[in-house]
Image (tube, helix red, strand yellow):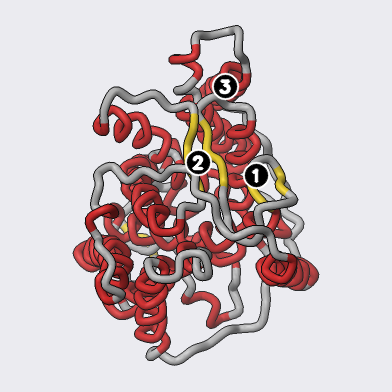
Amino acid sequence: MRLAAAAVLALSAAVTIAAPLAGLAVAGHSVAPYLVFPPRTEQVVHAPFAWGAFMAYSLPAFAAVALYWAALANTRPAQAATNLRRFPWWGWLGLALLAAGWLLAWSDALVPSPWRRHTFTPLWLGYILAMNGLVYRRAGWSLVTHRRGWFLTLFLVSSGFWWLFEFLNQFVDNWYYTGIEASDDWDYFLQATLPFSTVLPAVASTWAWLRQFSRLEAMTLPALRGHSSLAWLALLAGTLGLGAIGIWPQALYSVLWLSPLLILCGLQQVMVGETLLAPLRQGDWRPLLQPALAALVCGLLWEMWNYGSLARWHYSIPYVQRFQLFEMPLPGYAGYLGFGIECACVMDLVARLVEGGPLWPLERNDARARLPNTAWDTSTGRPVC
């Protein structure tokens, strides 16, 4: 299982890089400008706002709201007594880091500009610790204390994970950065890699926190089944989609967020035999709905804390660059939902690689968190006595 998980991660990254370059080559364009390391993008003026495109890109948001409403309306949450524990000291440290990071990120006078440019990482480390502290207070375990190996590995994987999106952004030029000072390319790479390392741990921590709400833990929808050939179809669609963004970047920029997910799920189903979304066959939609919501929560905070920072990102998106909440046009927030599912798929593969078993079912992993020194049978999900 570990070897297969590592192979899926590596092959997914390889296909994600190769597909858009292949698309450029097929269209007769040079690939050399896209092989610069580290990948950077500048502000690019795209197609102007269009109401038709704006409404079309808003439809996924309305569909997501309807889906969550249906799932929540169908809940039958258990009424379990909760014994709250003392908020841990490292949770207070996280709150202090978060508060200090936010204050310094938005302040012109408290610290010199070179320091202010580097507040993203401590702010989000504080958020990660604070969210795990909230989970620990309610559940008696947390990712920080009881699944440390898997959780720390997420920091390492997260950096490479987001650099793939930086690479893909070269083709669509949907976001760019200002306020960054780097002496050379390696300095820029190091400055960017540290913040990128917090992405997966932040989504994982928020997901663990959302699971403490009984209604979100009881969400159900009708079972969703599909033929095994869909894995090959997803892999083909994802690969072709990334190949096409190099040719028609303004028309297909949203594919950047969908195709890597299709490639990940397709490869994992083919090489491992199951994905994180397998429980949908039993009507258990939590592995899809919960991480999507977790990424949306993180997305709102990413955009808010970015808004007043010195080193920050801006958007330039074809057809929808209007009606912004912070820097992001409103339809863009729907992209965080798909991104959250992709994050969860990567987390599942990292769990298989580090712990030798899948991330789901979470009930098994809750017990595993409470009993960190127990051996587990990966085929049955039960402890080995």
Which residue is tagged 2? 142
Which residue is tagged 1? 300
Q: Secondary structure at mark 2?
A: loop
Q: Of 214 and 288, which appears nearest the observer?
A: 288
How many angstroms separate mark 3 from mark 2 (CA)?
28 Å
Quarter occupied by residue 198:
top left
Q: Of 43 and 63, which appears nearest the observer?
A: 43
Q: Are marks 1 and 2 in contact (CB under 8 Å)?
A: no
Quarter occupied by residue 49:
bottom right
**Residue 363 visible, this orientation:** no
Q: Of 358 and 53, which appears nearest the observer?
A: 53
**In this image, 64 relative to 24: left or right?**
right
Report the amino acid beneath label 1.
Leu
**Residue plotted at (35% across, 56% down):** 351
How many angstroms separate mark 3 from mark 1 (CA)?
17 Å
Dot 3 or dot 1: first in sequence order is 3
**Residue plotted at (50% across, 69% down):** 252
**Residue plotted at (54% across, 37% down):** 132
In the rendered image, which quarter contains the N terminus? bottom left
